[in-house]
Amino acid sequence: MLRGVAAAYTLKKATIFQIRAYENAADAIEHSTSEVKDLWDDNQLDQLSGIGPGLRGYLDELFKTGKVKHWEETKKGIPEAVFEFLDIPGVGPKTALELSKFGVKSIKDLEDKLKSGELIRKGFSEKVAIRIGSALRRQVVGIKDGRMLLPYAFVQAEKVLEYLKKSPDVVQADALGSLRRMVATVGDLDFAVATKNPEGIVRHIVSMPGVAQVVDKGDTKATVRLGSGVQLDFLLTHPDGYGALLQHFTGSKQHNIHLRTIAQKKGFSVSEYGVKKVKGEEIIKGEREEELYEMLGMETPVPEIRENTGEIEAALEHKLPKLIELKDIKGDLHIHSSFPIEPSHDLGLDSPEDMIAEAKKMGYSYLGLSEHQPSVANHTPEQMVELIKRKAKLVEHINSSDRNTRVINLLEIDIMPDGSISVPDEALKLLDFAIAGVHSVHRMDKDKMTVRILKALANPYVKVLTHPTGRLLNERESFEADWPRIFEFAAKNNKALEINSFPNRLDLSDSLVREAKRYGVKFVINTDSHEASQMENMRFGVAVARRGWATKEDSVNAWDFKKFAKWFGIV
């Protein structure tokens, strides 16, 4: 509400001091460890820094009457939709008002007008429209048939955990279930909370902003539903039993069944309450889940691999692999910048320089600019060569002036239905190498698809197969191919398979990563970013790699540049 007033002041050209007063107040409330209503109830609003007597008076009016006359007057004359649009990441007051002036009535109406192209046809900025569309897709694409995409669920859970930890009574809190195991799609969001004051935490939970319905609550649990329809389940326990609860409800079910069998053979019984000897009554609870595994003589498998696919045997033998971590990543090779290459598919939103700046922030030592190839339909081979020459010159200039982050000159090439590469060799020679993927005709005979991919990989300039199975989570199934045959070819010919981190891809899947690893295939974990902010999705590709038991050695973009360049043949 306070941000809405700040937006109204901005649009009505109030003083910067008035605007900042409301923005600072909103920040103070959002970062407070106590609920503002609780502070008001206890006559302690003065504990909130940045909120003066005037604003405290308005909050007093709000909690007494349910509205603030001055705020309503301030918002008068501004369409209600403007305040709805402010919930879209990256949309400020001026853009929100402009959307309203273009006749957009709601977020649903905005989605429809973006999809039909009506907004752009009426003169709305194409670049801004693309950026808003991207933000909406990140928000909305997340749920279908009760399953959320992992990145969507992860972001939602982060917000919930941030809210939970505002309470000083929360000793520890974690996500549970498929989200903690980083499964590609997630159902309801489950959380474990360690606290000595469960009653207070239940009150804290049901007061959470965004809660539309309290489904259930008890002494040590609560279930709420958000306005988005997402259900949140909370399990509370005393800190001394937190480890057992966390382990049990992380799952998977198959992992826990096998674990109980191992425990029984060793004379123990395992449950969410802890571990006890079969012939005894005392339950050893455990503050940390590692204690449970240690009692059974095991290493602790990381949550991502608790699927009963060999992790228990490896843990018993103390032979669990050291899996790749986000901090191991040295670069990203699938980046679409706004370089004007007149591509066959969508152009990136941010400049090469913006992408490189983001790579530096992430600590990368190299970055691959891999825009889609110039459109075959609109360019002759000679024109394609000329466009690629221009980009090669840009990359050369960047590398000559900045030696801290090496820019690699790449293109993402379309694999044609017959397996051919639609870019002439004269153009491919200008690249460090090419990455290639299937972008059309996803449905074909399994054998034909296999031959198509193998033919493309046989091209000496193609070094990486992008989004290998073509799946779009919650939208399109993977296409069929003879994957063992492709894995064998890739391993023998130094061709890397991509683990694409884009939220609705996560492709290869974790199961295919595990299978490909057995053939000795090398992976490259990329983000397929079309704007700098999307580069943060790398963590989800790393999660897929970890679920597939991939190590740093398995992932070429976890290598230092010297080793990486030698493998790819970069001079």
Image (cartoon, helix red, strand yellow):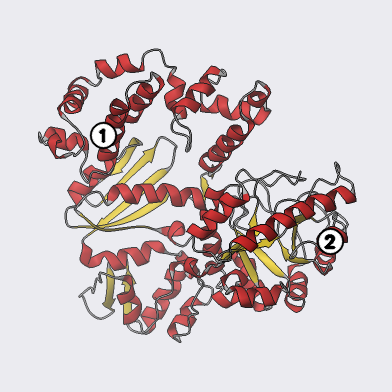
Residue 399 figure quarter: bottom right
- Determine whether, in the image, residue 34 is placed left or right of residue 503: left
Q: Mark 2 or 1 closer to N-term?
A: 1
Q: Considering the numbered disc 1 on the image, is that residue within a helix, a strand or a loop?
A: helix
Give the residue at mark 2. 452
Q: Residue at x 63, y 24 (%)?
A: 119
Residue 31 figure quarter: top left
x and y, in percent, of residue 242 in the image: 27, 64
- Determine whether, in the image, residue 87 is placed left or right of residue 160: right
Q: Considering the numbered disc 2 on the image, is that residue within a helix, a strand or a loop?
A: helix
Give the camera-side residue of 452 and 564: 564
Residue 564 seen anywhere in this rendered image of the structure: yes
Give the camera-side residue of 262 and 237: 237
Assign the N terminus to one quadrant of the image. top left
Crowding at mark 1 (Cα within 10 Å: few <14, some 14-19, many 20+): many
Q: How many marks?
A: 2
Assign the C terminus to one quadrant of the image. bottom right
Q: Residue furthest bottom?
A: 317
State the CA–CA distance, disc 2 to disc 1: 59 Å
User: Which label sits in the foreground, 2 or 1?
Assistant: 1
x and y, in percent, of residue 454 in the image: 82, 67
Q: Amino acid at mark 1?
A: Ala
Q: Residue furthest left?
A: 43
- Determine whether, in the image, residue 507 is placed left or right of residue 273: right
Q: Residue at x 40, y 12 (%)?
A: 77
Give the residue at mark 1. 25
